[in-house]
Image (cartoon, helix red, strand yellow):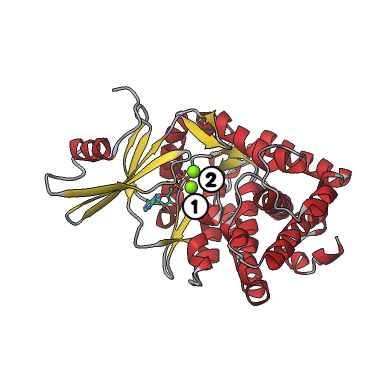
Amino acid sequence: MGYQAFTVQDAIERVRTLGLIGNEPVTAEEIGDGNLNLVFRIQAGEKRLILKQALPYAKVVGESWPLSLERAWIEQSALKEFAKVAVPFVPHVYHASKEEAFTVMEDLSHLTIVRGGLLEGEKYPLLAEHIGSYLARTLFYTSDFAVGPVAKKQIARQYYNPDLCDITEKLIFTDPFYDAETNAIEAGLEAEVDRIWNDAELKREVAKLEALFITKGDALLHGDLHTGSIFASAEETKVIDPEFAFYGPFGFDVGQFIAHLFFAAYPDYDRLRDERIKDIDTFWLTFASTFKALWEREAVEPFRKADGLVDDVLSTILQDALGFAGCELIRRTIGLALVADLEQISDSTVRLERKRHALRLGAALIKRRTECKTFTDLRNFDVTEE
Ligand code: ADP
Ligand code: MG
Ligand code: MG
C-alpha cells in the first residue's frame, strides 16, 4: 500500500483493520492544525485513539515546502526510544506504519497542552521536575556516555533527519538575523530588530551556536521541545511530537524548554516572572542532578573513570542551553512561528514592550552564556542594560 493522505474514513478503516477497535459505532475528527501533519481523534465505545499522519509538505507563507515522509518514521522511532528510558513521560504507541507515514497512539485528551493551559491560568506543579527528569534520561541514555561510542554511532545514523534539521537551521539560526521574508516583525519593533541585525558580536555567537547544532551529535534530541509539544495536568506530563528528532547537542532541548518557560511569564510578567524563573531553576536542578546520578551509576568506559568530567559536561550543557534559549526567544518573537504567550497580549504598548524584552533577553543569553558557571549566575542577569 503506497502513501496517500487520509480522510477521516481512511483513518477509521486503518485502526479497524489493525484490530485496535472493533465494530462498535465510531466518531472521529481531524484535530491537527494541518500545516505539517494530520491528527485524527477516534473514539469507539470506551476506546480512544489518536492517529497522526505526516503530509509530504509544509504550508509556509502561502507556499508549500516539500518535506520527507521519513519524519513519521523518525517520530515513531523516537517515541519508542524515549519510552524505553522515560516511559511515564511518553505517549504509548499502538501501531507505527513507515510506508503510510502514520502513528496510532494513546489519546491524551484528558490532559491539556501546556502553552494553552498556562495562558488559561492552569498550574502544573510537577512540570519542571518532570521535564528535567525526562530530558536527563532521554539525553543521557542515548549518548556515548551510556551506550558507548560504537553502539551510539549505529543508532545515530538511523536518525538522519535532514529536512527537519534544515527547517531549524533556517528558522532559528538564520532568518531572524537578517531581513528574510519568513520573518513576522510587528510594526513598532523595527529599531529593536535593527539593533540585532547590526550587532556583529551577536551574529557571530549565533553562528557558533548554529555550527554546534549542525556538527555536535551528543544525543537523540526531541528537537522541538516547546510548551506546545507537552501535554500535562497537575499530576502527569507527556511529551509529544518528536518529528524533529536527530543526534544533536545536549543543550538544544534544554534551551528550548527554558526559552518557553520565559515566554510563559510574558502574559503577566510582574506576577509570573518569579514563578517561571523558579520553574527554570527546578528544571535545571532536576536535570543536572538526575544526569549526574545516571552518569555515576551507569556511564561506560572511558568516561566513567574520568573524575569530575560530568561536572564539566553539565556546565557546557548549561552554557549551550542558554545560548539556544536566546536564539529561540528571538526567533519566536520576530520569526516565522510566533507564540501565543506574546501574541495574545491585547494592549499593543504592553505587547511591544514585552517583545522588546524577549529580544534583549535573547541577545543577553546568547552573548553572555559563558558567564554562567551555575544556574545561580542566571538569576543575576539584568537584560535592561543590553
Ligand atoms: P504537529 O507536528 O503537526 O505539530 P502534534 O503532534 O503537535 O502535530 O499534534 C497537533 C495537535 O494534535 C496537538 O496540539 C494536540 O492538540 C493534538 N494531539 C496530538 N497528539 C495527541 C495525543 N496523543 N492525544 C491528544 N491530542 C493529540
Ligand atoms: Mg506540534
Ligand atoms: Mg510537529
**Residue beneath label 1, please?**
229
Mark 1 near mark 2, Cβ–Cβ under 8 Å?
Answer: yes
User: Residue 152's x, y, as percent?
Assistant: 55, 35
> Quadrant of residue 80 in the image?
top left
**Residue beneath label 2, please?**
222
Judged left or right of residue 93, residue 155 is right
Residue 313 seen in render:
no
Residue positioned 19% across, 57% down in the render: 46
Residue positioned 57% across, 58% down in the render: 340
Count of numbered circles in the view = 2
Q: Any atom of ligand 2 within 8 Å of the CB at mark 1? A: yes
Task: Name the quarter where the C terminus is drawn.
Answer: bottom right
Residue furthest top in the image: 2
User: Residue 243's x, y, as percent?
Assistant: 49, 40
User: Residue 304's x, y, as percent?
Assistant: 63, 48
Sequence-first tag of 1 and 2: 2
Judged left or right of residue 56, residue 197 is right
Name the amino acid type tagged 2. His
Q: State the separation of the CA atoms marked 1 and 2.
A: 10 Å
Element type at mark 1: helix
Name the amino acid type tagged 1. Ser
Element type at mark 2: loop
Q: Residues within 10 Å of mark 2 (few under 14, many from 20)?
A: many
> Quadrant of residue 315 in the image?
bottom right
Residue furthest left in the image: 23
User: Residue 30's x, y, as percent?
Assistant: 34, 45
Question: Image height check: is 258 above or below 102?
Answer: below
The label nearer to you, 1 versus 2, is 1
Judged left or right of residue 181, residue 87 is left
Q: Residues within 10 Å of mark 1 (few under 14, many from 20)?
A: some
Residue positioned 83% across, 66% down in the render: 384
Q: Any atom of ligand 3 within 8 Å of the CB at mark 2? A: no
